[in-house]
Amino acid sequence: MPIAIKKGIRLVSNGGGANPEIVADEILYIAQALEVPLKLGVVTGDDVLDTIKRLRKEGMKFPNTDTGEEDITSIEDKVIGAHAYIGADQIIEALKAGCDEIVGGRFSDNALYVGPMMYEFGWEYK
């Protein structure tokens, strides 16, 4: 991290998994211990479990693709997490805000390189 910051290299990572806030705390702890000034961006929004629960209460069905059942009712009590991919737009916004390092819950694989490229070259979505 110190070398990257010193050379102006920005870092973008999926390092947060299901809890990017905890990873951010650790990154800031390390940066402070190394006396590295750091503007850190944390991107959340990939945890959609509460949204799924709300939509199911409203009557929406989520097919069980493993069993072919019409809904996930048979496994409802076993579901402990649901995560959606985050696209490049969140990375671009964090880079525009001047973040040196960005950690996200679950960026899509291509967002990790497309986001920084779109920012750097000024590309827009079409």
Image (spheres, rainbow, N blue to C red):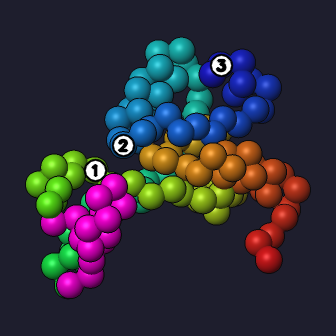
| Residue 85 visible in the picture | yes
User: Can you tell which mark lies on residue 18?
Assistant: 2
How packed mark 3 is, by other alpha carbons closer than 10 Å (few <14, some 14-19, many 20 or more), is some
- Alpha carbons under labels 3 and 1: distance apart: 34 Å
How packed mark 2 is, by other alpha carbons closer than 10 Å (few <14, some 14-19, many 20 or more), is some
What residue span does the magenta drawing correspond to? 59-73
Return the disc, 3 or 2, that comes first in the chain's sequence: 3
- Alpha carbons under labels 1 and 2: distance apart: 9 Å
**Quarter of the image that includes the C terminus:** bottom right
- Asked which quadrant contains residue 36, the reply is top right
User: Most prominent secondary structure in the magenta stretch?
Assistant: loop
Closer to us: mark 3 or mark 2? 2
The three-letter code of the residue at mark 3 reads: Pro
Return the disc, 3 or 1, that comes first in the chain's sequence: 3
Task: Give the residue pinned by disc 1.
Answer: 81
Name the residue: 32% across, 69% down. Answer: 63
Q: Where in the figure is residue 69, as x and y percent of width and height? A: 26, 68
- Alpha carbons under labels 3 and 2: distance apart: 26 Å
60 in the magenta segment: yes
54 in the magenta segment: no
Closest to the observer, 122 or 18 = 18
Q: Where in the figure is residue 23, as x and y percent of width and height? A: 41, 33
